Amino acid sequence: MEDIWLGLLIILMTSLVVQAQLKTGFYSSSCPTAEATVRSTVESYFNKDPTIAPGLLRLHFHDCFVQGCDGSVLIAGSSAERNALPNLGLRGFEVIEDAKSQLETICPGVVSCADILALAARDAVDLSDGPSWSVPTGRRDGRISLSSQASNLPSPLDPVSVQRQKFAAKGLDDHDLVTLVGAHTIGQTECRFFSYRLYNFTTTGNSDPTINQASLAQFQALCPKNGNGLKRVSLDIDSPAKFDVSFFKNVRDGNGVLESDQRLWGDSATRSVVQSYAGNIRGLLGFKFNYEFPKAMIKMSNIEVKTGTDGEIRKVCSRFN
């Protein structure tokens, strides 16, 4: 029993040390313009194409779920993480590389790619009329990136039980799960990940019964039968470019696009969180989501981070030093 308690204490102390080594304003002396440089870079790409915002948010999420938030998803190479099947649709690499290139000119060897990614995700949400928050920084870049380690990323086919297990493995609970999935308010997917729900979900060829039948024709128009599977569709059918609570209203009303999103309404624990955000009073409940989302993002961006002398500070984000 003493060994068990000692083990738990070591885990707790390690977690506290990691939390302590990440801090807001980590670069305030070593590279004072770091955060402003990332922000201006993200903004320049966003102004040309606002859909880069969900791309950057997803890039950070996928990075944190494999090897922790260490920039491993940014490494190029045939066997690298970014070439794993769940990562083939990732976008925004050029934004991170651009910001890194500028920062290497201003303060070489100081700002990690992992931190640039965490900052860019925050800026992407802020530019989409969502909340902003202070991002704890001080992450270092990992030296491992393997596609074989990306198999446990959440999938649009996952039932809630599997989603719960995957998030719990990273120290995230049901509340974090639903809150972070709320990022789909500005997200997109491709018809191939959605159309099976519209035409042949059951053995009789019917649609998914959890889809609001009043919206079925609208969804089928977006993704016609035998149509272009690569066509991109918004995950929030009401306000696709605005970071708000309408995504949760859609899930509540049977208008969730991804099966994994709609399933959140079928589980009592996750449904209560969806309901708390969806509600009826848009302003009040939108404010609640805007308060909870940054907390969940900070918690996620602390997953298995490398600090101190662990890892490295890459010169180029797509390759190890």
Image (spheres, helix red, strand yellow):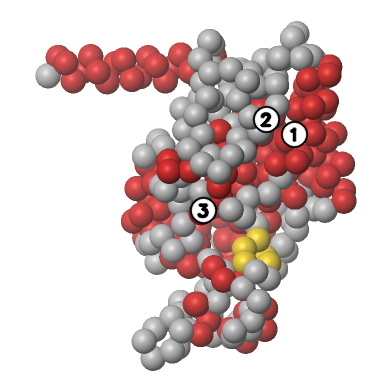
Spatial separation of the CA atoms under disc 3 and disc 1 = 21 Å
Q: Position of residue 194 (x, y in %)?
A: 55, 71
- Which secondary structure lies at badge 1? helix
- Which secondary structure lies at badge 2? loop
Residue at mark 2: 317
- Which secondary structure lies at badge 3? helix
- Mark carried by residue 86: 3
Q: Quadrant of residue 112?
A: top right
Q: Position of residue 188 (x, y in %)?
A: 65, 61
Instruction: Name the residue: 82% across, 53% down.
Output: 49
Instruction: Name the residue: 48% across, 61% down.
Output: 156
Residue at mark 1: 97
Instruction: Name the residue: 74% across, 9% down.
Output: 30
User: In the rendered structure, are the residues bearing label 1 and label 2 in contact, judged by CB atoms less than 8 Å apart?
Assistant: yes
Q: Position of residue 201 (x, y in %)?
A: 43, 81
Kind of residue sitting beneath label 1: Glu
Mark 1 or mark 2: which comes first in sequence?
A: 1
Mark 3 or mark 1: which comes first in sequence?
A: 3
Q: Does 152 appear above or below 186?
A: above
Quarter of the image with the N terminus is top left
Q: Does 317 appear above or below 17?
A: below
Quarter of the image with the C terminus is top right
Mark 2 or mark 3: which comes first in sequence?
A: 3
Instruction: Name the residue: 75% across, 55% down.
Output: 51
